């Protein structure tokens, strides 16, 4: 089942920064990712952001120029277009699926992925490609949405994201959640050592706190 996140984010692109940066439902993953990035990078660091969107997770890194290069990857043509307007001199790549990451031949010191993992159809491909893309002893920082028993929204492994009465409604756009034990097994089997696993509130949905995990890990 193909996830139509590309159609959703094409619709949302023009309003994305306004809707997610302020108000009661502020979107927190980019700031947490950003904080971890600053702990690991130098002016020689090559960074790739998978699911870069409008570039929220690399905004301050870009402003301080604490990097050698930044590559951004996304499935939404409109999100990439907005990101290009905001950040001059970073390499932006439009992909249609995770499999397209195989076409990227450069090596990086850091892979980041903020608020995107839950839309991937195949987590195994993601971790395989992250390991391939990283230099020796490189780092992966990402967030994911866990399954939480008895949670009003997060109790299901897969659920539709947007109701039919929303202007951003897209058929076939869904969230996929994982047990933490499943993520840990995937990381181990793909030769990553977990350095940090932190639970946090990512945003509010229908008065419910949506819980995410922030993972920092190192290529073995």
Image (tube, rainbow, N blue to C red):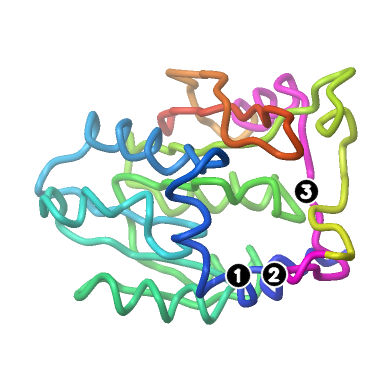
Pick the front one: 117 or 192: 117
Residue at mark 3: 175
Number of the label disc, if any, that sits on residue 8:
2
User: Residue 24, located in which quarter of the rendered image?
Assistant: top right
Pick the front one: 204 or 107: 204
Residue 168 position in % (x across, y down): 73, 69
Q: Which residues are magenta?
A: 166-188
Q: Are marks 2 and 1 in contact (CB under 8 Å)?
A: yes
Q: CA distance from mark 2 to mark 1?
A: 6 Å
Dot 3 lies on which element?
strand
Q: Residues within 10 Å of mark 2 (few under 14, many from 20)?
A: some
Report how many numbered discs are placed on residues in the image: 3
The residue that appears at 28% across and 72% down in the rendered structure is 86
Residue that protrudes farthest toward the front in the picture: 23
User: Residue 140, located in which quarter of the rendered image?
Assistant: top left
Q: Is residue 171 magenta?
A: yes
Q: CA distance from mark 3 to mark 2?
A: 12 Å
Mark 2, mark 1: which one is toward the viewer?
1
Residue at mark 1: 12
Number of the label disc, if any, that sits on residue 47:
none
The residue that appears at 52% across and 68% down in the rendered structure is 15
Mark 1, mark 3: which one is toward the viewer?
1
The residue that appears at 39% across and 37% down in the rendered structure is 33
Q: Is residue 35 magenta?
A: no
| Residue 191 placement, left or right of 33 | right
The quadrant of the image that shows the N terminus is bottom right
């Amino acid at each position: 089942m193909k996830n139509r996140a590309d159609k959703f984010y094409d619709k949302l692109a023009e309003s994305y920064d306004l809707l997610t940066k302020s108000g009661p439902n502020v979107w927190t993953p980019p700031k947490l990712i950003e904080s971890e990035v600053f702990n690991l990078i130098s002016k020689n660091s090559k960074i790739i952001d998978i699911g870069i969107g409008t570039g929220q997770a690399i905004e301050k890194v870009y402003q301080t120029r604490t990097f050698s290069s930044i590559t951004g990857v996304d499935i939404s043509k409109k999100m990439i277009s907005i990101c290009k307007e905001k950040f001059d001199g970073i390499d932006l790549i439009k992909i249609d699926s995770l499999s397209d990451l195989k076409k990227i031949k450069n090596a990086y010191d850091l892979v980041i992925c903020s608020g995107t993992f839950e839309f991937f159809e195949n987590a195994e491909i993601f971790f395989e490609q992250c390991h391939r893309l990283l230099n020796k002893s490189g780092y992966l920082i990402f967030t994911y949405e866990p399954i939480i028993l008895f949670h009003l929204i997060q109790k299901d492994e897969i659920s539709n994201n947007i109701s039919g009465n929303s202007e951003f409604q897209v058929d076939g756009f869904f969230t996929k959640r994982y047990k933490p034990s499943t993520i840990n097994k995937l990381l181990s089997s793909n030769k990553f050592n977990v350095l940090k696993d932190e639970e946090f509130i990512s945003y509010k949905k229908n008065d419910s706190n949506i819980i995410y995990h922030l993972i920092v890990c190192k290529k073995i």
